[in-house]
Image (tube, grey):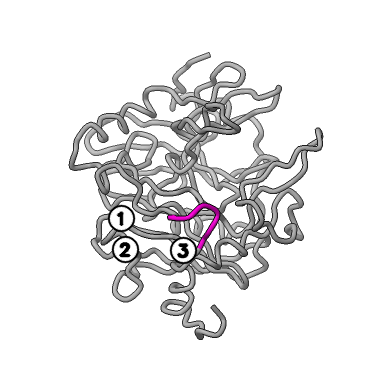
């Protein structure tokens, strides 16, 4: 079922803005934070430039600790599922499968700290199990593809050659299979740990055992930017973004940066045996560590992450770890 949510209806039901975050020409008008059983989120109204239209959206904190803009919703096996943006075709066991490209829903790195700060001082976050389905477009059972209002701004941007970061090719890749030490960056797209640190922010994470630091860092050529997370034991990288300023009505960048997805494993990643006895994992084979003490569906991915040269360099140059610890 495809429908367009009405801001007036939401406002009349008490979903009124309490905060405003501005980035480029887009204003995010946010309610106070809410939560359901799985996520914390804001109801947001996005206004862009001189356009008088306000677009209701759901901005939520993913389990990877990144703030995202949900693309739609559907039911999977009867359960509510939040759409995770554009799709890609993956080959699994010789078969082509459609999968979500979750990084396409990542909100700009420039607003991540602002959203995090809005929930930091909240003592009690109210439970709200209904508004997500009021705001998001609902697809039929099992639909993972977003609708055209999400995909078309990306398609238009990609059609312009100058918007294709590194010519539309991956800016980082592994030259040897299942070898994290073989990570290589295209020239100019490496993080600039010397002069490129734009922003640092502190927060806390129960999953990662305490203090969690965030570092927004430019690439050497300034065309893209990275967000590094550093906890007491873990370091990992959020999918990099362009430094372009065009956002869609979902508040996400229209210009995309392609990478090898294993560059951006979070410190704890999915790794568990399902009800059918099958291993479900997003950690490269042979690199899964101990299960998380607070989430038994996730295992420590540090054995892979810490062997990547970029992580070793980040620890030395930014965290100031001695060489003996890397």
Choose between 146 and 68: the one closer to the eye: 146
Q: Residues within 10 Å of mark 2 (few under 14, many from 20)?
A: many
Magenta stretch containing residue 255, yes or no? no
Residue located beneath label 3 in the image: 228
> Which label's residue is closer to the chain start, 3 or 2?
2
Q: Tags 3 and 2 in contact by the CB under 8 Å rule?
A: no
Magenta stretch containing residue 178, yes or no? yes
Residue 286 shown left or right of residue 24 in the figure: right
**Total marks in image:** 3
Residue located beneath label 1 in the image: 224
Q: Residues within 10 Å of mark 1 (few under 14, many from 20)?
A: many
Q: Which residue is the extreme one toward the top?
A: 1
Residue located beneath label 2 in the image: 218
Give me the residue at 55% from left, 67% from top.
306
Q: Quadrant of residue 216?
A: bottom left
Q: Tags 1 and 2 in contact by the CB under 8 Å rule?
A: yes
Q: Is residue 181 visible?
A: yes
Q: Residues within 10 Å of mark 3 (few under 14, many from 20)?
A: some
Is the residue 259 above or below the residue 247 in the image? below
Residue 282 shown left or right of residue 228 in the figure: right
Q: Tags 1 and 3 in contact by the CB under 8 Å rule?
A: no
Pick the quarter of the image with the C terminus.
Answer: bottom right
Distance of mark 1 from mark 3, alpha carbons? Answer: 13 Å
Q: Which residues are magenta?
A: 175-180
Counting from the top left corner in percent of width and height, residue 279 is at 73, 42
Is the residue 200 above or below the residue 79 in the image? below
Q: Secondary structure at mark 3?
A: strand
Q: Secondary structure at mark 2?
A: strand
């Amino acid at each position: 079922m495809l429908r367009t949510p009405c801001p007036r209806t939401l406002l009349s039901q008490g979903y009124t803005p309490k905060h405003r975050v501005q980035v480029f020409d887009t204003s995010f008008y946010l309610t106070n934070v809410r939560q359901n059983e799985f996520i914390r989120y804001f109801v947001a109204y996005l206004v862009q430039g001189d356009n008088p239209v306000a677009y209701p959206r759901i901005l939520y904190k993913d389990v990877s600790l990144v703030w995202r803009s949900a693309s739609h919703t559907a039911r999977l096996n009867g359960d509510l599922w939040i759409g995770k943006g554009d799709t890609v075709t993956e080959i699994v066991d010789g078969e082509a499968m459609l999968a979500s490209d979750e990084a396409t829903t990542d909100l700009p790195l420039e607003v991540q700290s602002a959203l995090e700060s809005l929930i930091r001082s909240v003592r009690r976050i109210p439970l709200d199990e209904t508004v997500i389905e009021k705001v998001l477009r609902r697809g039929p059972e099992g639909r993972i593809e977003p609708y055209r209002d999400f995909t078309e701004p990306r398609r238009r941007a990609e059609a312009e050659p100058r918007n294709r970061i590194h010519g539309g090719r991956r800016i980082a890749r592994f030259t040897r299979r299942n070898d994290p030490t073989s990570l290589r960056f295209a020239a100019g797209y490496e993080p600039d740990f010397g002069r490129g640190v734009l922003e640092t922010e502190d927060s806390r994470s129960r999953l990662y055992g305490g203090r969690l630091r965030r570092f927004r860092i430019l690439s050497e050529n300034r065309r893209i930017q990275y967000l590094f997370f550093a906890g007491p034991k873990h370091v990992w990288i959020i999918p990099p973004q362009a430094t372009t300023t065009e956002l869609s009505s979902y508040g996400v960048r229209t210009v995309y940066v392609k990478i090898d997805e294993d560059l951006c494993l979070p410190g704890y990643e999915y790794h568990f045996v399902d009800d059918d006895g099958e291993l479900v994992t997003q950690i490269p084979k042979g690199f899964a560590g101990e299960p998380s003490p607070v989430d038994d569906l996730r295992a420590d991915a540090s054995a892979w992450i810490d062997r990547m040269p970029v992580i070793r360099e980040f620890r030395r140059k930014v965290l100031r770890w001695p060489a003996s610890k890397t």
